[in-house]
């Protein structure tokens, strides 16, 4: 059995760890509330805009007027937009995204992919892409000031590269925020736009009356919808990150509490054994003096 000094040191170490994990849990809970409110407020608008976009793109596919509804090459050039976190201590949050990146690239390679680039939003995705020897561009500073204005240059660059024919497909990989305890790894095709008939939605192939004209609305709605879909993915990932970290720190705090209980019990047993041993030695010494 470990001596009392070693057990006391372990107890002090675990207590310090528990204080840190408990504080991190509270910080993540506070940030989660703000991030969750932002996601919930954005979703109805973003979802309706995506529905209009999908229906509109079906009409545009027939006329071939839109640069975002079809690839510009042979389908062998892929851009993966990987959204995860700048920090760890959030369970399998980052690992799940990295695994999904590998899966997307493997599936595309089976279909003839020859070139795959990565745009990393989050240091973990950037480091993973570098280890995997993929061409990667990082935008880790987005989380410092996360708002639509700072996300706009990133999605505009992606849209510009696709329209210029640099890529045939753009895929988003991120954690979808379902609730505080559940985050779902999501792979979503951003470009080319998938028509409503292919998505199988309940509102597929809705007919719209365009005013003033179809062309002028397309010019505004399509870029706006793509930007909103990207921003929604970033907000979902941000909220999911804090939810995952809060859950991980909650479990770590509970584990530290249980370990402290075990160590205190072990300490009390060791202390009792030491006291019993001292009493035995004193009694033995007293008996020796009598003799």
Image: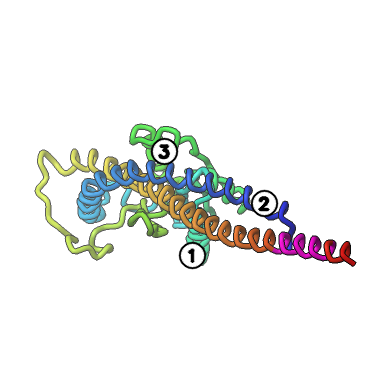
Q: Magenta segment, principal secondary structure?
A: helix
Q: Residues within 10 Å of mark 3 (few under 14, many from 20)?
A: some
Percent x, y for residue 234? 38, 45
What quarter of the picture does the N terminus occupy? bottom right
The answer to whether residue 72 of the structure is visible from this angle is no
Q: Which residue is mark 3?
A: 154
Q: Is 121 placed above or below 145 here?
A: below
Under tag 2, what secondary structure? helix
- Left-right relation of 135 to 166: right
Q: CA distance from mark 1 to mark 3?
A: 25 Å
Q: Residue furthest front?
A: 290
Q: Residues within 10 Å of mark 2 (few under 14, many from 20)?
A: some
Percent x, y for residue 103? 50, 63
Residue at 40% in and 51% down: 243
- Left-right relation of 230 to 249: left
Under tag 3, what secondary structure? helix
Specify which label sits upstream in the sequence, 3 or 2. 2
Q: Is 11 placed above or below 148 here?
A: below
- Left-right relation of 49 to 287: left
Q: Which residue is mark 1?
A: 107
Residue 2 vs residue 28, the one in the foreground: 2
Specify which label sits upstream in the sequence, 1 or 3. 1
Disc nearest the viewer among 2 and 1: 2
Magenta stretch encompasses residue 277: yes
């Amino acid at each position: 059995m470990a001596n009392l000094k070693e057990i006391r040191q372990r107890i002090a170490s675990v207590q310090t760890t528990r204080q840190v994990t408990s504080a991190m849990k509270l910080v993540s809970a506070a940030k989660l509330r703000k991030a969750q409110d932002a996601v919930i407020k954005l979703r109805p608008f973003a979802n309706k805009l995506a529905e209009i976009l999908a229906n509109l793109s079906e009409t545009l596919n027939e006329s071939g007027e839109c640069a975002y509804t079809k690839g510009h090459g042979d389908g062998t050039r892929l851009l993966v937009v990987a959204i995860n976190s700048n920090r760890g201590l959030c369970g399998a949050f980052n690992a799940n995204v990295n695994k999904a990146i590998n899966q997307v690239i493997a599936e595309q390679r089976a279909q003839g992919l020859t070139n795959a680039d990565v745009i990393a939003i989050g240091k973990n995705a950037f480091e993973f892409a570098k280890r995997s020897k993929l061409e990667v561009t990082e935008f880790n500073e987005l989380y410092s000031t996360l708002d639509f204005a700072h996300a706009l240059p990133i999605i505009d660059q992606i849209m510009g590269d696709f329209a210029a024919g640099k890529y045939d497909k753009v895929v988003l990989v991120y954690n979808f925020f379902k609730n505080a305890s559940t985050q779902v790894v999501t792979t979503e095709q951003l470009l080319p736009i998938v028509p409503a008939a292919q998505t199988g939605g309940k509102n597929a192939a809705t007919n719209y009356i365009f005013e003033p004209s179809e062309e002028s609305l397309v010019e505004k709605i399509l870029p706006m919808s793509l930007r909103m879909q990207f921003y929604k993915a970033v907000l979902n990932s941000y909220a999911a990150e804090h939810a995952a970290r809060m859950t991980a720190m909650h479990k770590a705090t509970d584990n530290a509490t249980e370990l402290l209980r075990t160590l205190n019990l072990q300490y009390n047993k060791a202390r009792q054994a030491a006291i019993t041993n001292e009493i035995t030695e004193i009694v033995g010494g007293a008996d020796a003096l009598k003799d």
